[in-house]
Image (tube, helix red, strand yellow):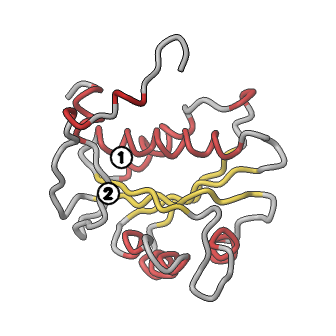
Amino acid sequence: MDFHELIINRRSIRKYTDEPIAQEDVRLILEAALLSPTSKSARAWQLVAIEDKSTLEQLAACKPAGAMSVAGCPLAIAVTVDSTKSEAWVEDASIAASYMQLQAAALGLGSCWVQVYGRFAADGTPSDQYVQEILGIPEECSVLCIISFGHPNEIRKPQDTEKLKWENVHIGKW
């Protein structure tokens, strides 16, 4: 599959089989993040790979809605950045997370972005603080998201390129 086909067919997958992800595939997913570009080559991201079912279930409670894919996945990766080392930490973490999702899709795996930064757990605790406490992440490392990964247990239609918002594209100026 070429890159264009990959991005048309990549969809958020929230349901996974129980099949574990091969360790070589985990390594390739993590390597994709480590190869991602960063502002001023800061490379300030820190990644926490989680496969323990109990921890995944705890992490799924980081916010009341939208995090359940974490409880049912065989692998999740928390994407964090030392915000004292990069003023563009949100962008750096976003690029790393996106690269991991594209690598997973290229391997035939599903993934789903679970937003953590700026969200809150059911008890009002900031979601990033909740995740930091569970995973032992230092205070200076801001958690942007958790990406769930696994073998898809649902089928999603490819993106419909006929519905692309070309009217949102401006050439030269607005």
Circle 2 SS class: loop
What residue appears at the point 31 percent right and 59 percent down from the top-left corner? Answer: 150
Whether label 2 touches label 1, CB < 8 Å: yes
- Please tell me how crowded label 2 is: few (under 14), some (14-19), or many (20+) other residues with Cα within 10 Å: some
Instruction: Indicate left or right for 2 with 58 as reference.
Output: left
Q: Amino acid at mark 2?
A: Ile
Work out how far the residue at label 2 is from the one at label 1, CA to CA, in angstroms: 7 Å
Can you give x and y, in whole percent of width and height, for residue 114 in the image?
47, 62
What residue appears at the point 55 percent right and 76 percent down from the top-left corner? Answer: 62
Q: Amino acid at mark 1?
A: Asp
What residue appears at the point 82 percent right and 43 percent down from the top-left corner? Answer: 85
Circle 1 SS class: helix
Can you give x and y, in whole percent of width and height, for residue 60 in the image?
47, 76
Quarter residue 111 falls in: bottom left
Residue highlighted by disc 1: 25
Can you give x and y, in whole percent of width and height, for residue 108 in the image?
24, 45
- Please tell me how crowded label 1 is: few (under 14), some (14-19), or many (20+) other residues with Cα within 10 Å: some
Q: Nearer the viewer, residue 106 or 165?
A: 165
Quarter residue 149 falls in: bottom left
Quarter residue 14 falls in: bottom left
Can you give x and y, in whole percent of width and height, for residue 133 in the image?
69, 76
Find residue 141 and name its label: none
Residue furthest to the top: 172
Q: Nearer the viewer, residue 66 or 41?
A: 66
What residue appears at the point 70 percent right and 50 percent down from the top-left corner? Answer: 81
Residue furthest to the front: 174
Residue highlighted by disc 2: 21
Instruction: Indicate left or right for 130 with 146 as reference.
Output: right
